[in-house]
Image: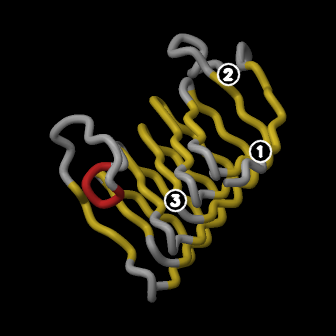
């Protein structure tokens, strides 16, 4: 998902639904139908049917439900991803990640737990594996 706006991979023809600019503060529940980018400050829940990108200026606190999540900024809370979570070199995640695939680039930080779910176990989450991780890779 990280797509054209972050120089990452692009997977398919999903349309961009919009973005929150770096000068915007938002509190509440946000529901979007396509891929969405956050560069501002968000406190609350974000749900996207496709992908979600947290840019380098993003500071998000709450829950994320999306198919594909890429973090280049800061996130505190819980992520539920159906396909993949990717933490970019400047990305910092504090909390929990529930996803079948996790990618942490050198310099990216995960301080919390990761629950690696298979596609079949995703719905019942009882078969997840909890892996406590604290990564502090330095260049």
Distance from Cα at disc 3 to Cα at disc 2: 27 Å
Q: What's the mark number on residue 72?
A: 3
- Labelled pair 1, 2 in contact (Cβ < 8 Å): no
Disc 3 or 1, which lies upstream in sequence? 3
Q: Secondary structure at mark 1?
A: loop
Q: In the rendered view, tell whether residue 61 sits above or below residue 26.
A: above
With 129 as the anchor, is 3 left or right in this view?
left
Instruction: Count neighbours of disc 1 (C-alpha within 10 A) and say few if under 14, some if 14 to 19, many if 20 or more.
Output: some
Q: Which picture quadrant has residue 5?
A: bottom left
State the SS at label 3. Answer: loop
Which label sits on residue 125?
2
Query: What residue occupies the far front of the structure in this picture?
Result: 139
The vertical placement of 55 against 35, above or below, is below
Residue drawn at point x = 29 percent, y = 49 percent: 3
* Residue at position x 80%, y 28% in the image: 131
Q: Position of residue 12 (x, y in %)?
A: 20, 35
Spot occupied by residue 86 in the image (x, y as percentages of width and height): 51, 42
Q: Considering only order in the chain, which callout, 2 or 1, is on the residue closer to the N terminus?
A: 2
Q: Which residue is mark 1?
A: 135
């Amino acid at each position: 998902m990280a797509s054209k706006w972050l120089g990452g991979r692009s997977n398919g023809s999903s349309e961009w639904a919009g973005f929150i600019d770096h000068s915007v503060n938002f509190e509440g529940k946000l529901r979007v139908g396509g891929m969405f980018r956050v560069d501002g400050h968000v406190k609350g829940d974000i749900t996207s049917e496709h992908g979600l990108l947290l840019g380098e200026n993003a500071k998000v606190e709450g829950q994320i439900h999306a198919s594909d999540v890429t973090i280049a900024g800061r996130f505190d809370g819980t992520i539920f991803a159906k396909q993949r979570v990717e933490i970019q070199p400047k990305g910092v995640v504090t909390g929990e990640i529930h996803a079948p695939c996790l990618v942490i680039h050198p310099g990216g930080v995960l301080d919390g737990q990761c629950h690696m779910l298979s596609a079949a176990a995703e719905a019942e989450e009882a078969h997840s594996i909890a892996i406590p991780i604290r990564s502090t890779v330095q260049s």
